[in-house]
Amino acid sequence: MANVNDKQIALAKVYSSAMLVLAQASNEEDALLADLVDLVALLDRTPTLAAFFGDPTVDSNDREQSIERIFRGKASDLMINTLQILNRKDRLSVLSTIVDQYRLALQSERGRVDVHVRTAVPMPEELKTTLAATASSQTGKNARIVETVDPTIIGGLVLQIGDVKYDMSVASKLGKMSKLLQLRATKEIHSGKTYVTEGNG
């Protein structure tokens, strides 16, 4: 998923909460999630359709008709009606974030939580078990480890539970160290001081 700012996440939470209430009223929570996940996967596979959904210059009436033509009869009425609401509010550009927040809201409602963990190499099963137990203890929910192997973090791990992120990677530590050194060098330049001494002769 592309980088998402706090405002978009807050907005997505509002819409996802309303969607969950509607889905619960008709016992369609899982069906709606399945339809939404399939839709996001379709948009990922079809860049032209994704661009059409997110293009602010497209007339909302034209997009409304296209949504009806493409999805009516092939997906649940609840999902299609949800898309039409998002279309009228010009929120389709953050659809994937809304889907993520809907999934999190549904999991929370059912006492579950996904713990996303990025590591440079695959984690041993003992570590997964320990992380799951710790997360379950801290959140009071049944934690599920979702592992991603990412060699760019070099070592350590990046752990995210809901909106809370814990970056304990080597890459992050190196990045912080680099920023500190740059800051120190900048201060030295402005102050006229230097920690480099010239040898005699």
Image (cartoon, rainbow, N blue to C red):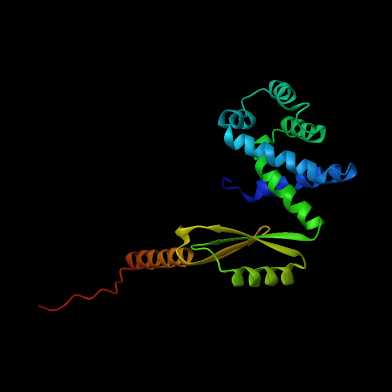
Front-most of residues 108 and 37: 37
Q: Residue furthest right?
A: 25
Relative to 27, 142 lies left or right = left
Residue 194: percent from left, percent from top: 29, 72
Q: Within the image, what quadrant is residue 71 found in?
A: top right
Quarter of the rendering occupied by the C terminus: bottom left
Q: Is 172 placed above or below 78 here?
A: below
Q: Is 66 placed above or below 151 here?
A: above
Residue 53: percent from left, percent from top: 64, 30
Front-most of residues 85 and 20: 20
Q: Is 87 placed above or below 117 here?
A: above
Q: Is 148 placed above or below 168 here?
A: above
Residue 92: percent from left, percent from top: 68, 35
Residue 10: percent from left, percent from top: 71, 49
Front-most of residues 18 and 49: 49
Relative to 106, 161 lies left or right = left
Residue located 67% across and 57% down the image: 163
Q: Residue furthest bottom?
A: 200
Q: Within the image, what quadrant is residue 132 found in?
A: bottom right
Residue located 73% across and 50% down the image: 103
Relative to 185, 37 lies left or right = right
Q: Within the image, what quadrant is residue 182 found in?
A: bottom left
Residue located 73% across and 68% down the image: 136
Residue located 60% across and 69% down the image: 125
Q: How many marks?
A: 0
